[in-house]
Amino acid sequence: MMDQADRLRELVKKKTEKKNKAISKKTQLPRIITVTSGKGGVGKSNFVVSLSIYLQRNGNKVLIFDADMGMGNDDVIMGFLPKYNVYDVIFNDKKIEEVVTETQFGVKLLPAGNDVSKFEEVTHEQRTKFIDKLSILEDVDYIIIDTGAGINRSVLAFIACCEELIVVTTPEPTSLTDAYSLLKAVNYFKLKDDIELVVNRAANEEDGKHTYDKFSSVVRRFLNIKLNYLGNMSDDKKVSQSVRMQQPFLVKYPYAKVSLDLENIANKIMGHSGNKKGTTVQGLFRKLFNIFS
């Protein structure tokens, strides 16, 4: 009788723990991470797509917000072309389900459209209706915002609206110069004081770390920013080959050095989760509307 009672208590305990974990996960706010770069062509979108897929594979629900206005190519990397974008929800009364694409990798994609200035045209009624529609996207763990490159109002707005900022650069002097100019603007407008860096197309780990050390020493000297090193991704021809085949490099070449580098970076990001506050998808767009109104 005692054995049977013990087993019953253990069963009830396990069910309670499982229920509590489910409630905790449901009420946990998603982490909003903006990924940007000082110049184009540094591999930012390839990084975003493969990072999102890896996060998804590790039990997270991920939404990519492709906010590279007019130049977004996250969809192309994943092998499809979306029919609608976020403005079709706001101005053409489309449903969120019609605009958000759930890709074959499980990751969801929300295209931003062509012109961020259209946010200024949104009426109060349209804004309220749109925010209400976003409730369907509450069940996500990560929102990865892929911005355009360089320094402009839209890029700075998305940086201001996120909890975490990742800057992608390469060891090339022009890339580092443009990345520094971006951080200088972020520092000037006091948007972020804690930023993470990824060095793409590094010859090896030593090259990536040397690039970071050299870059961070300048940042520490002239800017009030704490720069953290997430890691490097190897200079690998398999990335460009996968782009031509419209497949993410993590999927097409899972055992390539660049894929293993990406996994190391993603594991670091997941390991930082305890320190992040997060916000909702609706909260993100409320911030954006406030900036552009």
Image (spheres, rainbow, N blue to C red):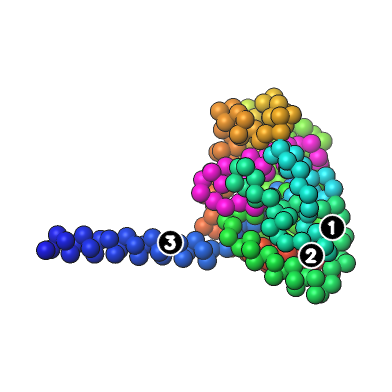
Q: Horizontal and vertical percent for residue 276?
A: 57, 59
Q: Quadrant of residue 290?
A: bottom right
127 w.r.t. 75: above or below: below
Tag 3: residue type?
Lys
Tag 1: residue type?
Val
Q: Horizontal and vertical percent for residue 192?
A: 71, 58
Name the residue located 51 percent from the left edge and 45 percent from the top edge.
58
- Whole-angstrom CA distance, mark 3 to mark 1, is 39 Å
Tag 2: residue type?
Asp
Q: Horizontal and vertical percent for residue 239?
A: 69, 30
Tell me which numbered mark, 1 or 2, is placed earlier along the sequence: 2
Tell me which numbered mark, 3 or 2, is placed earlier along the sequence: 3
Q: Pointers 3 and 2 in contact (CB under 8 A)?
A: no
145 w.r.t. 292: above or below: above
Does residue 16 show up?
yes
The crowd level at tag 2 (other Cα within 10 Å; few <14, some 14-19, many 20+) is: few
Pick the quarter of the image with the C terminus: bottom right
Which residue position holds label 2? 93
State the SS at label 3.
helix
Which residue position holds label 3? 21
Q: Is residue 125 magenta?
A: no
Does residue 169 show up?
no
Looking at the rendering, the stretch of residues picked out in magenta corresponds to 39-64
The crowd level at tag 1 (other Cα within 10 Å; few <14, some 14-19, many 20+) is: some
Name the residue located 62 percent from the left edge and 47 percent from the top edge.
107
Name the residue located 62 percent from the left edge and 42 percent from the top edge.
104
Which residue position holds label 1? 116
